[in-house]
């Protein structure tokens, strides 16, 4: 084994040393072990993204980025299909253009992932949030039309950006006890696994939202088998320490899914493998006029008095802002903790990452799609070894390529990509070992966080219950004075949030 290979092996097998090292010691050891590439361009990339300090490896960054993208690529088909059914406020049977939503989703996701990688240097991907799109489509859009829903998200994102540019968001994050961060991370892991088994076909659904009961298994047995086999391959490769386990499994099983769907000639559009059937391929069609129509209709609706005279508008701005804030903050905190275990360098959430996250929500609403957020599927890339923003840039490039290759990406069925979601949940549940279960102030909020994230299909609701549960348990156990005032304020705010949310439900 040559010197460079030996040093890379040392970098790859370092995690067990973190318990006995300070971040400075780890960074110094990484620098001593790392060998920069002889290629000038590659060496520049390694230096910019601090490969030497973080102990990163180019191959793993690329594999991690591809893995994350394959795990979340379903959003490019699910989000347009979900939101495009939202009717206009004019009650003329008009709905949003589906390709327009897809184009806006891919474009803004790509830009924000690249910004996240370049300026925050973390392997975290952004795209339109599942759960938030359902809120926009079914709740807010049901009252204010898609135009009003887009205006609400636009205005709430302005508030969100304003808060993120101030020290307030970082102040709140620092006030959160580590036990609550762990609770939120575990909840997110199980939430994304729940999304995974639902998209495999195991669960029934109501308007795109999974229901906690088995689906019609005799109709979904092929997708379930394909998704389950994909998961088994991921687990086999992963626990055999084969690099790119998730990416390999998804690519191989996608080809198999296309062959099965095409050979069996699936023509029912409700079938989970419908889009994998080559005979259903619609060709290289791009409706850019539909994209322009979506945002033009939204901006024209600013003069519609129905939007401004409805209390739902103002309540929704508050609710959407809170969901954006704590959905992303909770997820970012969980990933920071996950990255810290891989690098011993990420002790605090990057302020730049928080600002980019908030700006992404504004860009999404302006271009005609639902709010962006940090994607829990990023955990798949991190588990594959991604440590730097290069992985996020890979995600961004793939999102932009997906605009041209949309017909090809549409062939990858959800049951296949969903296996990666379940794998993420398996990896993130390991954090449960660090929860202080014997302490009721952490036992109760952890349980409530998991329960509400899954049962309500919204990460922010689980975050809310974690805070409320923690504050309550600290009070009844005689530890009220040990709670940071900011945590009490947030708990009260979340109670108000639940009350406000009740008024926009239809």
Image (cartoon, grey):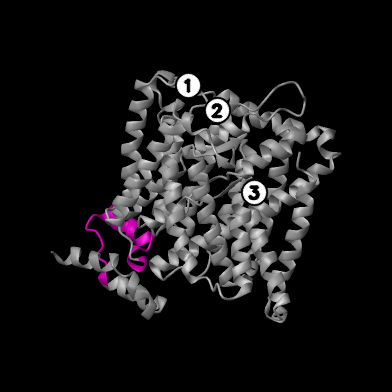
Q: Nearer the viewer, residue 360 or 225?
A: 225
Can you tell which mark lies on residue 239?
none
Residue 51 in sight in this render? yes
Report which residue position mark 2 lands on.
99
Report which residue position mark 3 lands on.
456
Residue 303 position in % (x across, y down) = 80, 33
- Comes first in the chain, label 2 or label 3: 2
Q: Residue at x 75, y 55 (%)?
A: 497
Q: Nearer the viewer, residue 491 or 290?
A: 491
Is label 1 in a helix, a strand or a loop?
loop
Is label 2 in a helix, a strand or a loop?
helix
Answer few, some or many: residues within 10 Å of disc 2's Cα (few below 14, many 20 plus, some between 14 and 19).
Answer: many
Report which residue position mark 1 lands on.
285
Rounded to the nearest angstrom, the CA distance separating label 1 from label 2 is 9 Å
- Comes first in the chain, label 1 or label 3: 1
- Comes first in the chain, label 1 or label 2: 2
Q: Is residue 208 above or below residue 54?
A: above
Q: In the image, is 254 to the left or to the right of 460?
A: left
Rounded to the nearest angstrom, the CA distance separating label 1 from label 3 is 36 Å
Give the foreground label among 1 and 3: 3
Residue 144 position in % (x across, y down) = 77, 35
Answer few, some or many: residues within 10 Å of disc 3's Cα (few below 14, many 20 plus, some between 14 and 19).
Answer: some
Residue 66 position in % (x across, y down) = 37, 46
Q: Nearer the viewer, residue 372 or 136?
A: 136
Rounded to the nearest angstrom, the CA distance separating label 2 from label 3 is 29 Å
Q: In the image, is 146 to the left or to the right of 116?
A: right
In the image, the segment drawn in magenta is: 33-54
């Amino acid at each position: 084994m040559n010197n460079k290979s030996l040093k890379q092996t040392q970098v790859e097998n370092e995690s067990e040393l973190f318990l006995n090292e300070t971040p400075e010691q780890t960074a110094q050891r990484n620098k001593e072990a790392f060998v920069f590439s002889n290629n000038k361009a590659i060496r520049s990339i390694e230096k910019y993204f601090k490969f030497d300090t973080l102990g990163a490896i180019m191959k793993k960054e690329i594999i991690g980025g591809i893995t994350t993208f394959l795990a979340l690529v379903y959003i490019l088909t699910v989000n347009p299909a979900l939101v495009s059914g939202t009717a206009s406020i004019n009650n003329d049977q008009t709905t949003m253009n589906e390709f327009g939503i897809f184009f806006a989703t891919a474009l803004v996701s790509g830009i924000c992932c690249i910004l996240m990688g370049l300026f925050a240097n973390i392997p975290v991907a952004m795209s339109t949030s599942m759960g938030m799109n359902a809120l926009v489509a079914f709740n807010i859009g049901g009252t204010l039309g898609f135009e009003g829903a887009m205006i609400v998200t636009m205005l709430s994102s302005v508030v969100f950006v304003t808060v993120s540019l101030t020290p307030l968001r970082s102040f709140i994050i620092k006030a959160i006890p580590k036990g609550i961060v762990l609770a939120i991370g575990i909840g997110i892991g199980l939430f994304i696994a729940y999304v995974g088994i639902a998209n495999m076909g195991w669960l029934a659904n109501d308007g795109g939202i999974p229901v906690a009961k088995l689906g019609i298994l005799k109709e979904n047995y092929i997708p379930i088998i394909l998704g389950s086999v994909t998961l088994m391959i991921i687990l086999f490769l992963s626990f055999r320490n084969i690099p790119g386990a998730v990416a390999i499994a998804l690519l191989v099983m996608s080809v198999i899914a296309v062959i099965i769907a095409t050979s069996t000639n699936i023509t029912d559009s409700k079938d989970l493998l419908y889009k994998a059937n080559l005979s259903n391929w619609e060709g290289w069609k791009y409706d850019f006029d539909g994209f322009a129509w979506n945002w033009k209709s939204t901006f024209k609706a600013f003069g519609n008095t129905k939007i401004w005279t409805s209390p739902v508008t103002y309540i929704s701005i508050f609710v959407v802002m809170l969901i954006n804030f704590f959905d992303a903050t909770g997820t970012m905190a969980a990933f920071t903790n996950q990255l810290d275990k891989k690098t011993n360098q990420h002790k605090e959430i990057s302020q730049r990452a928080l600002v980019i996250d908030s700006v992404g929500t504004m860009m999404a609403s302006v271009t005609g799609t639902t709010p962006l957020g940090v994607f829990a599927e990023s955990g798949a890339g991190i588990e594959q070894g991604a440590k730097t923003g290069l992985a996020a840039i890979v995600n961004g490039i793939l999102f932009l390529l997906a605009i041209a290759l949309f017909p090809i990406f549409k062939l990858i069925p959800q049951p296949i990509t969903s296996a990666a979601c379940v794998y993420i949940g398996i990896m993130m549940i390991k954090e449960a070992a660090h929860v202080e279960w014997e302490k009721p102030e952490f036992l109760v909020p952890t349980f409530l966080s998991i329960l509400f994230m899954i049962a309500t299909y919204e990460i922010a609701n689980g975050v809310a219950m974690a805070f409320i549960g923690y504050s309550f348990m600290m009070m009844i156990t005689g530890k009220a004075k040990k709670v940071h005032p900011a945590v009490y304020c947030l708990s009260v705010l979340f109670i108000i949030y639940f009350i406000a949310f009740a008024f926009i439900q239809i």
